Image: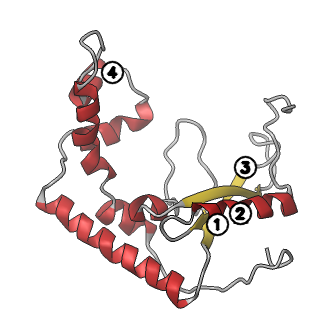
Amino acid sequence: MKEQGAIIISLNEEIDSDYLVNEVSVHLHDLKDHLNVYLEALQAHASVHSVEEILASGKYHPGIEENLKKAVVLRTGTPEYNKRLVERNKLQTRVMKLIADYQLDAMVYPHQKQLVCKVGGSQNERNGVLGSVTGFPSICVQAGFSTPSKTAPMGVPIGMELLGRPFSESTLIEIVYGFEQATHHRKPPLSVPPLG
């Protein structure tokens, strides 16, 4: 990025992704109330009309069962939900202050703290939660690969995430496009024929 003219500023600001997932994120609190509005509006011939009916049907990926079971007992408007909204506002202010103080176009960080898990496994330690919790635009781009192994002959893709201030999507796309054109890190999966 430096070779392409970017000015890189290192930040020592610690943002605890586990705290964001466990104490700030409202995605499970929102799930039942918001999804049920959609499901209830479906025509009568739809097989389910609520999150409870989805759970009862068993027709969901096993990897989301735990989240569905948590979400079915949570809802919006509770004291816990409102507390999380206050924490989200604090985080948004903190991130906006960092962007303003350092005059940043984007914050850049590894998307994961660990290599992506195998299919069916549970992905922990995601830095990507920063974008989902703040609601600020973010974009992830391939930044390279891990060392190849028997189960991953090309290595495992490693993502770099960029987070910007609200409505900065065009800037993020411009940065990522320049990065992709300069590095050519992306490799198509071995199981997929080349495009074009």
Quadrant in which residue 51 is drawn: top left
- Are there few (<14), some (14-19), or many (20+) residues within 10 Å of tag 1? some
For the residues labelled 1 and 2, the Cα–Cα distance comes to 5 Å
The N terminus - image quarter? bottom right
Q: Amino acid at mark 1?
A: Thr
How many C-alpha atoms fall within 10 Å of the one at disc 3: few (<14), some, or many (≥20)?
some
* Residue type beneath disc 3: Val
| Mark 2 → mark 4, Cα distance in angstroms | 43 Å
Q: Which of marks 1 and 3 precedes in the sequence?
A: 3
Cα–Cα span, label 1 and label 4? 43 Å
**Residue indicated by mark 1:** 171
Residue designated by label 3: 156
Q: Residues within 10 Å of mark 2 (few under 14, many from 20)?
A: few
Tell which tag, 1 or 4, sits nearer the viewer.
Answer: 1
| Image x and y of residue 58, in percent | 33, 21
Q: Dot 2 lies on which element?
A: helix
- Residue bearing the label numbered 2: 174
Question: Which label is found at residue 36?
Answer: none
Residue 150 appears in view: yes
